[in-house]
Amino acid sequence: MQAAELFEQKIKPPEIARLLRVSRKSAYQWHQLWRDGGPEALVSCGPSGSRCRLSPRCLEKLAVCLEQGPAAHGWVEDQVWTAARVATLIGRKFHVSYSVSGATRLMHRLGFSPQVPARRVAERDEQAVNVWKEASWAEVKEPGRPAEATS
């Protein structure tokens, strides 16, 4: 609506682009819309993208499920919510298909963040790893830049 007020004051699109910190192309498109349809033509249509496939009630239920933890829903090996697990949980509980990236966005919307489980090889020999770090790592590691070479 700021743009409409500025257009009514006969301010040119390039100046409006500068004032509102948008591209000139956007300002010219807005100007065309404003000329054709008035200030009402510049009213926002809301956020772009597909709408959430879960109802507000289902989102509340999902948040409760996430708070209960993975073990309450069959994942007993560790206590982390991965995005893949959340996508599976949504499919099981609400019969709605979500991609892993979609589940990640949904988790963030609910105030959660997907976790990546720390995995170690079962046969890992900690003593051998420590010996290698002490003996070989210094030889393999590339030296850093000298302090005076930084830009």
Image (cartoon, helix red, strand yellow):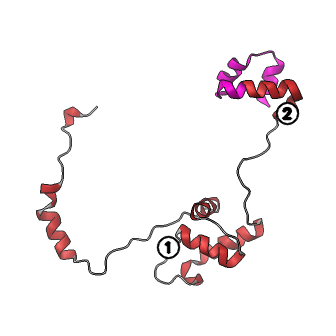
Give above or below for 80 relative to 143.
Answer: below
- Nearer-N-terminus badge (2/1): 2
Mark 1, secondary structure of its residue? loop
Characterize the magenta stretch by its predominant secondary structure: helix
Q: Which mark is residue 5?
A: none
Numbered disc in front, either 2 or 1? 2
Q: How busy is the neighbourhood of tag 2: few (under 14 within 10 Å), some, or many (20 plus)?
A: some
* Magenta stretch in the rendered image: 1-27
Is there CB contact under 8 Å for labels 2 and 1?
no
Quarter-wise, where is residue 146 in the image?
top left
Badge 1: how crowded within 10 Å, few (<14), some, or many (20+)? some
Answer with the quarter of the image where residue 39 lies: top right
Q: Residue at x 85, y 23 (%)?
A: 35
Spot occupied by residue 144 in the image (x, y as percentages of width and height): 20, 44
Q: Position of residue 63 (x, y in %)?
A: 66, 70
**Residue 12 part of the magenta-drawn span:** yes
x then y, percent, for residue 29: 75, 28
How many marks the image carries: the answer is 2
Query: What is the three-letter code of the residue carrying label 2?
Result: Ala
Disc 2 is placed on an element classified as: helix
- Looking at the rendering, which quadrant does residue 102 occupy? bottom right
- Magenta region includes residue 148: no
What is the three-letter code of the residue carrying label 1? Val
Residue 28 horizontal/vertical position (percent)? 73, 24
Q: How far apart are the two marked residues, 2 and 1, measured between alpha carbons?
A: 47 Å
Q: Name the residue that disc number 2 marks.
A: 41
> Is residue 75 positioned above or below 4 on the image?
below
Viewed as shown, does residue 62 lie left or right of 143? right
Residue where numbered disc 1 is placed: 80
Give the quarter of the figure containing the N terminus: top right
